[in-house]
Structures are given as structure tokens and as C-alpha cells.
Amino acid sequence: MPFLFILGLATFASTFSMRAVDPMLNILAADLNVTLQEVAMLASAFTLPYATMQLVFGPIGDAVGKVRLVRFNLVLLTLGLAVSALAVSHQMLLAARVFSGAFAGGIIPVVLAMVGDRVSFEQRPLALSRILLALVLGQLLGSAASGFIAAFVGWREVFATASVMAGAAALATFLGITEQKAREPLSFGASLTRYGVVLRNPLSIKVYAVVAIEGAFSFGVFPMVAPLMVAHGLGDAVEAGLVLAAFAIGGAFYSLAVPVLVRILGLSGMMGAGAVSLGLLFMISALVPHLAMVVGLFALGGFCFYMLHNVLQILATELAPEARGSAVALFASAFFIGQAFGALLTAQVAVLVGVEPVFLLSGAVLIALAYPAARLAPRASPTGR
């Protein structure tokens, strides 16, 4: 099986499991007899351990081998999702989401680092766009399919489906990818040394700060899509799933347009245009009273988001080539820590002033992010300097 295809399966399984909860928050709240604010914690329960455990998995992948690590984490993600499907209380589901998120955290960043190891810098934008396509397809089905499954079959079946997908991806990595790295002893000191190598590059902190803000005010608002549908009288879980699926479809179209965008805008132009456009689209979506228009806005938003995020990914793979697993782990950790705290922040803002201001605030922040983001790309080079 082709190398990128198998890595894509692993990426797909991880993103499907992450996005599965977003469109069914209201269904979970009613079935588990908890408030919307309590059930919104399920999003952060996945993303916080996802983000923090990457700080552990990055050096482990550099030491013991990235293929071995992806296999291990896919197996444990499969188990965590199976337990989620069997949960009998909010507390049990919360614990299962924490467990699943922790081991899902060692999949996508390690996959990105593997691409950095095995694909030349010149070919990396195209290779990463193929991984991105698998990522957004996982978001697409994780958002759209979970909304339909939860509404017409049940939320437990959503987690069961995710578990089967993760298991299939795990099997593919065992059968189709060979580990090329010899094992090295795990050492806390060596891990710190690798992180020190990454952070000595002055570009690193800037990239990580930008991606954390991006995560907080882009994916961090996703749990509020279903409440936005309800507030505007546009529907609930199914409609929220369609909106989030449209975002993923936009990302899929972006992955096909990468060569043209790089040629026309350059990396810097892609980042600036993506941030400004996404911010404006979020702000408009808060004011639109028609479902079809919201779906269209989010489709465009997905395209614009990945214009920014995919370039940040490319920069992250070259911050420290000699410690690439650690560099990408820090990058992904910053993104998902931002996303987790963004979800908590948006839930509180929605309680205090309503759900529409959540999207207005997020849009304004993303527009302001365009300038510092666009200044990052011109300073990058294949040596990460």
C-alpha cells in the first residue's frame, strides 16, 4: 500500500474521532441529562490531552521510531473509542474522551514528521496537501456522518464507527509500512535536548504563538455551531454537521489548489489572505439567517483556513530537521491547546452574551492575526533559518 495512503488512513481516523462530538452536543446533553456547558467539556476533554501528550510523543517518536509510535497509538485510540461507545454516564464518557485524545495526540504530528523525514522540501507542500486531504475528509465524515448517525441511530454508534476506522488504520500500518529507524534508549535528558534544539531557532516561538491563536479562534468555535443553528432557528445536530462538513469540503478543495496558490500568492500571501478571509467569513456567518448561506460561508472558510494552516505546517517541519518529531509535536500541541482553551472561552462567551458574538470575536482576532502570520513565511528556508 502506498506510503502516503497509509499515513492518510491514520490521519483520517484521528480527525474523525476528534470532530465526531461537535455536531451532537445537544443530543448528548439531553441523553446524559447534563447542561450544554458540561457536555461542551467533551470537546476539551479530547483536545487538551491530545495537545499536551504530544510533548511526550514527539521525543519518543524521534527515539524509538515514528512508525512504531503511530501503530501503538492507533491501537489504544481504537480501545478508547470502543469504551466511549459503551459509556453509561457523562463522567465515563468524559474519561474515555480524555484517554482517546491522549493517544490520538501521537498520530497526526508524527505523520507530518514522517513526511518531513521521507519527502524532500521541494515536494513537501504537495505531499502534505495529500495528508491534508485525508485530514479534512476525516473532518467531513466526523462532522456530517456523526450528526446523521446521532440523530437517526444514536450517539453510541458514532463512537463505534470511529473505533472501527481507527482499528482499520492500525492494521494498515502494521501491514504496509516498515520502520526504518533503529530503537534508541528513551531519556528525559535527551528529550529536553531535542526541545532545546527546536527552541533555539528564533522562528519557532513565533510559529507556535500564531498557530495557538489560530486554533483558539478557528476550531475553537466549532462546538458553538450547533447552538448557532438553534439560535437562528436553522436546525440542530444534522444541520451543524452539514455546516462543519462544508468547512472540511472547502479544505479538500484547497488541497487540490495548492500548486496554483503557491505559484500565484506565495507562502506569505497565502497566510495573510487566508487569515483575513476566514475572519470575515466567520463574522458574516453570525448574521446570516439562511442555512444554505451558512453552509457556503463555512465551505469558503475551510478553504481559507488551510491556506493559513497548511503553510504553518510546512514551516513547522523545517524548524529543526534534526529533531523534527519534537518540533512538529510542539507545533501541534500549541494548536490544540489553543483549540481546547478556545472551546472553553467560546462556551463562556455564549453563556454571557449569546452565541453570535462568539463568531464576531473570533473573526476579528483572525483578521488581526493576518499581519504577524504573513511575516513568518519569507523568513523560512529549507534549513529552518
Image (cartoon, rainbow, N blue to C red):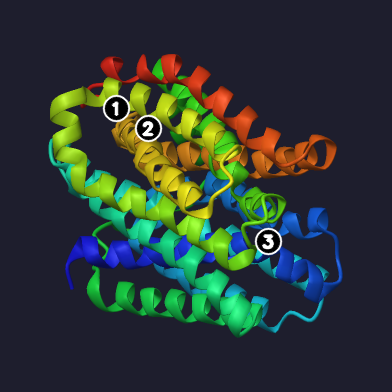
Contact (Cβ within 8 Å) of mark 2 with mark 1:
yes
Q: Residue at x 26, y 44 (%)?
A: 116
Q: Nearer the viewer, residue 369 or 186?
A: 369
Q: What residue sits right under mark 3 in the picture?
A: 98
Indicate which disc, 3 or 2, sits on the residue closer to the N terminus: 3
Could you tell me residue 254's position as x and y percent? 27, 45
Q: Residue at x 71, y 40 (%)?
A: 346
Q: Would you place residue 197 above or below residue 223 in this image?
A: above
Q: Quadrant of residue 95?
A: bottom right
Q: Residues within 10 Å of mark 1 (few under 14, many from 20)?
A: many
**Mark identifier at residue 270:** 1
Q: Is residue 3 visible?
A: yes
Q: In which quadrant will I find the N terminus?
A: bottom left
Indicate the secondary structure of the residue bearing disc 2: helix
Q: Amino acid at mark 2?
A: Leu
Q: Amino acid at mark 3?
A: Val
- For the residues labelled 3 and 2, the Cα–Cα distance comes to 28 Å
Q: Quick check: 233 left or right of 332? A: right
Q: Is residue 184 visible?
A: no
Q: Would you place residue 374 above or below residue 226 in this image?
A: above
Mark 3 or 1: in front is: 1
Q: In which quadrant will I find the C terminus?
A: top left
**Mark identifier at residue 308:** 2
Q: Residue at x 72, y 70 (%)?
A: 27
Q: Residue at x 37, y 36 (%)?
A: 304
Indicate the secondary structure of the residue bearing disc 3: helix
Indicate which disc, 3 or 1, sits on the residue closer to the N terminus: 3
Q: Would you place residue 298 above or below residue 40 in this image?
A: above
Q: Residues within 10 Å of mark 2 (few under 14, many from 20)?
A: many
- For the residues labelled 2 and 1, the Cα–Cα distance comes to 6 Å
Q: Quick check: 224 left or right of 329? A: right
